Image: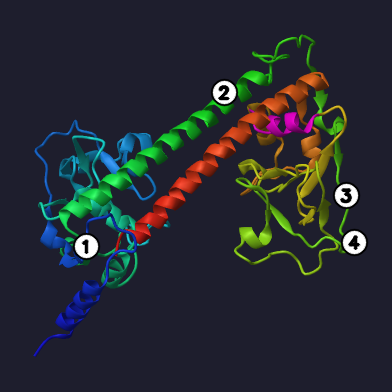
Amino acid sequence: MTSNNNLNVEKIKAEVSKNVPELRFQGFIDAWELRKLKEVTERVRGNDGRMDLPTLTISAGSGWLDQRERFSNNIAGKEQKNYTLLHKGELSYNHGNSKLAKYGAVFELTTYEEALVPRVYHSFKTNGKSSSCFIEYMFATKRPDRELGKLVSSGARMDGLLNINFDEFMGINIILPSTNEQNKISEFLRKLDLTITLHQRKLDKLKRLKQGYLQQLFPKNDEKVPRVRFAYFENKWEQRKLGDLLTKNSKKNKDLNVTNVESVSNKTGFTKQTEQFEDYSVASADLSNYYVITEKQFAYNPSRINVGSIAYKAVGDDKSVVSPLYVSFSTKKLLNDGYLWNWFKTTSFQSQRERLSEGGVRDTLSFNQLSEMSINVPEYLEQEKIGSFFKQMDDAIALYQSKLDKLKSIKQSLLQKMFI
């Protein structure tokens, strides 16, 4: 009598024989085959006693990372003598549960010739019947998650590891094309990854450059003028109380004319609540007590100002309302909005915020406390020049971020269409 397990395998094989990926390179027509992972790989374990090799860990979002970079030091300790020696081209499965990888993540070692990796990882290598790079991308599609999910009987342990042992992991079903097709797919996706990496580096470089200019174009707390100035500006800067340059917004939505409810995010600024909370608004049913936010106004969450939850309503943006718990204000004519917006990103603002904020789980900053801050300001034309300069930088950063997001989206789409 045939077991149910064998029947299921035959059923899967029958389904696979009818299917090919939605997107395929020209010249490949053979059906993909159902295999056990252990049929195309073999275990890697132990080490040769060398402890001076790079000691790595897997991050679901970033792949292999040096422990000294991720944790500021080597956290292996005495356990390092039990770590696994991994060679370039070999793989490890970190069966740790995380937000990005519910059933763990698999990565091939590509950046080092040799490295030591935690023994708790399931490390393995291909045996000529599969491509290491293809195996990594296959796991990146999350398609094996269905197989891995069947092996998890009680979720994650206290240490965050899924209770999937090596033999169970090796027993999962995977679907593979010929090695030639695997190599073709892997080569294409590696080139796409290289493009993504180059765009990420350019974006990171621009962000670092902006941070450098923030330090150079704004005076430090004990300085009267910045270290770098635009040409033809020579007048001294004046120290003022921020309260002398701001007007608090107290306009409420009493007539209920505004129904666009927004929150302030430290990443995206003003954000529709239905977008931030996935089509769910946390606003009160009665919006009459909410503050109306119009063009050229700032708003911040007093209890999240420590993580940068402050936003600016640019010219052309839709009018909205925000929670009465928020603080909203605009600048007087002596202070340029762009200048102030970037001053909020300086160490001068951060140090004063830390000093003036009330304690607790989250530091809070009232409008009165904000008004007590000191700010060094040049003449308005120089403020305008500084604000315009950083606006151009922000636009360039946004453009690179958009290109990077598009490339990542293309990759995710390809992963779904090029694999079964």
Q: Report the residue marked by disc 3.
A: 250
Alpha carbon distance from label 4 to label 1:
67 Å
What's the residue at 87%, 56% (across, down)? 252
Q: Nearer the viewer, residue 168 or 38?
A: 38
Amino acid carrying mark 1 in the image? Ile
Q: Quadrant of residue 310?
A: top right
Dot in front, 1 or 2 = 1
What's the residue at 20%, 60% (across, down)? 177
x and y percent of residue 288 in the render? 85, 63
What's the residue at 35%, 38% (across, down)? 194
Marks 1 & 3, CB-CB < 8 Å contact: no
x and y percent of residue 151 in the render? 26, 70
Dot in front, 1 or 3 = 1
* Mark closest to the chain's N terminus, 1 or 3: 1
How many C-alpha atoms fall within 10 Å of the one at disc 4: few (<14), some, or many (≥20)? some
Amino acid carrying mark 3 in the image? Ser
* Quadrant for the N terminus in the image: bottom left
Amino acid carrying mark 2 in the image? Gly
Q: Report the residue marked by disc 1.
A: 29
x and y percent of residue 223 in the render? 69, 15
Alpha carbon distance from label 1 to label 3:
68 Å
Q: Which of 267 and 346 is in front in this view?
A: 267
Q: Report the residue marked by disc 4.
A: 254
How many C-alpha atoms fall within 10 Å of the one at disc 2: few (<14), some, or many (≥20)? few
* Mark closest to the chain's N terminus, 1 or 2: 1
